[in-house]
Image (spheres, helix red, strand yellow):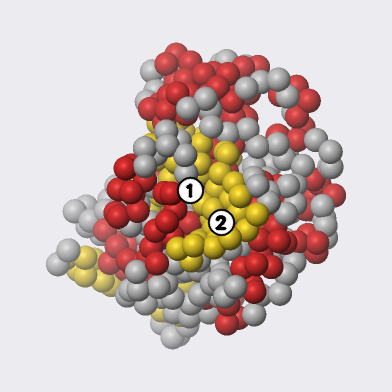
């Protein structure tokens, strides 16, 4: 690795993004968005429905099937103050699926809006869920960094926490849209293949896909595979430090099935990633496999990919192929009689990173000075300005509801 990514200055990853270039709403037809195509240094444009024609037959395309949850809960105090409780990640139980199935009690780590007005006591709200009237009570616990432990209790064993969020929660659209969530967002801010509840932000590269595009990909001989990374609110966390060494990456939870690992191995450990979340998961798999090659009996916690781990182990991993690494994960799953790998990643992908599995990326246009822009720059070997200059001068729409790009270095 040539440069030390810790000393990258985030100010070098800035570009002018006028508010009118941020897409506040999606297009009426998802797959009619523009597609910027970057191939071997050349930039052109097309329409998203043409995507399959740019991909080689027998390639493997990987999607993130996470589903955005209606994570914002609003309570009004007796004083009239409105308090927002934004569920970030499950605390007790800390497994997403189990937490959503809880009846009577569930605890989450939450961000609190209007915190200064909630000094003590509990928040209550009466609501009707599935025709039954219940009272939801929120009690504030200890502080964990910028979030708080919140205990939720309700008085009906027939109602799950998932039921409550479905009725009482609000979908958390990105803060930079500067507008309230609308009913239409419930559909448009989910990918058509979303399945596994747990994200507080959509993996937006996937918003462009329609059944027609997925069918065309299959017709083209592209194999489609899914994994799960639950997108945390940290994805919007701006880099505040001058050098990225001072930026702490958020932890995100991943699960990848044995069949997905087998598919990756069958494709020589190479894949086309839909979205930066799929990129982060696929590249994390390589480093998890490296950990297992060194320590076959590593615990789930030891498998977690730390922020700077890929750079610290760069020299010793130089000769380890992606298939070798993935086979170590397969062995681990077989030894432990597991169908799915569950762990988490804090990986930061920045210029100087050596991609191991991802050979092409479908992604939207990201915020200036964001870690996602660093990830793109690392992939196109610093050529991001050419891509973004083209998009800005050719009327592309930016951010979550904006247009798409296909990057092939």
User: In the drawing, does residue 357 fall left or right of residue 196?
Assistant: right
In the rendered image, residue 318, in percent from the top left (x then y), is placed at 73, 24
Q: Residues within 10 Å of mark 1 (few under 14, many from 20)?
A: few
Residue with the mark numbered 1? 54
Count of labels in the image: 2
Q: Residues within 10 Å of mark 2 (few under 14, many from 20)?
A: many
Res. 270 visible in picture: yes
Are discs 1 and 2 less than 8 Å apart at CB? yes
| Viewer-nearest residue: 381 or 216 | 216
> How far apart, in angstroms, are the residues tagged by discs 1 and 2?
9 Å
| Viewer-nearest residue: 404 or 165 | 404
Q: Quarter of the image containing the C terminus? A: top right
| Viewer-nearest residue: 26 or 300 | 26
User: In the drawing, does residue 22 fall left or right of residue 241?
Assistant: left
| x 59%, y 25%: residue | 322
In the rendered image, residue 146, in percent from the top left (x then y), is placed at 62, 60
| x 42%, y 37%: residue | 57
Residue with the mark numbered 2? 37
User: In the drawing, does residue 205 fall left or right of residue 169?
Assistant: right
Q: Which one is earlier in the sequence, the residue at label 1 or at label 2?
A: 2
Q: Quarter of the image containing the N terminus? A: top right
User: In the drawing, does residue 278 fall left or right of residue 348?
Assistant: left
Question: Dot 1 lies on which element?
Answer: helix
In the rendered image, residue 67, in percent from the top left (x then y), is placed at 38, 53
| x 75%, y 22%: residue | 316
């Amino acid at each position: 690795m040539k440069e030390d990514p810790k000393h990258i200055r985030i100010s070098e990853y800035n570009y002018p993004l006028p508010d009118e270039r941020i897409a506040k709403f999606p297009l009426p037809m998802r797959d009619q968005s523009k597609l910027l195509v970057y191939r071997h240094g050349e930039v052109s444009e097309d329409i998203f429905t043409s995507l399959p024609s740019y991909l080689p037959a027998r390639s493997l395309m990987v999607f993130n099937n996470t589903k955005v949850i209606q994570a914002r809960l609003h309570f009004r105090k007796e004083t009239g103050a409105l308090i927002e409780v934004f569920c970030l990640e499950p605390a007790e139980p800390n497994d997403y699926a189990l937490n959503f199935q809880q009846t009577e009690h569930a605890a989450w780590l939450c961000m609190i809006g209007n915190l200064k007005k909630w000094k003590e006591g509990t928040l209550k709200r009466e609501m009707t869920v599935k025709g039954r009237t219940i009272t939801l009570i929120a009690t504030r616990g200890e502080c964990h960094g910028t979030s708080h432990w919140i205990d939720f209790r309700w008085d009906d064993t027939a109602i799950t926490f998932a039921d409550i969020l479905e009725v009482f929660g609000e979908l958390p659209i990105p803060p930079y849209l500067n507008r309230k969530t609308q009913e239409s967002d419930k559909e448009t801010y989910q990918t058509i293949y979303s399945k596994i509840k747990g994200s507080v932000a959509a993996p937006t590269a996937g918003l462009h896909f329609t059944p027609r595009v997925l069918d065309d990909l299959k017709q083209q001989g592209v194999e489609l595979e899914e994994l799960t990374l639950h997108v945390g609110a940290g994805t919007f966390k701006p880099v505040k430090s001058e050098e990225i060494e001072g930026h702490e990456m958020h932890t995100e939870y991943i699960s990848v099935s044995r069949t997905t690992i087998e598919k990756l191995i069958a494709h020589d450990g190479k894949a086309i990633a839909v979205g930066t979340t799929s990129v982060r998961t696929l590249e994390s798999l390589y480093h998890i496999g490296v950990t297992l090659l060194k320590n076959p009996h590593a615990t789930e916690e030891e498998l977690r990919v730390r922020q700077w781990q890929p750079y610290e182990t760069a020299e010793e991993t130089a000769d380890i192929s992606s298939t070798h690494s993935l086979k170590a994960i397969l062995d681990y799953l077989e030894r432990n009689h597991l169908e799915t790998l569950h762990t988490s990643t804090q990986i930061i992908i920045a210029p100087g990173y050596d991609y191991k599995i991802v050979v092409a990326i479908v992604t939207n246009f990201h915020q200036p000075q964001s870690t996602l822009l660093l990830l793109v720059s690392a992939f196109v070997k610093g050529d991001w300005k050419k891509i973004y200059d083209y998009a800005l001068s050719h009327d592309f729409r930016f951010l979550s509801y904006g247009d798409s790009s296909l990057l092939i270095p």
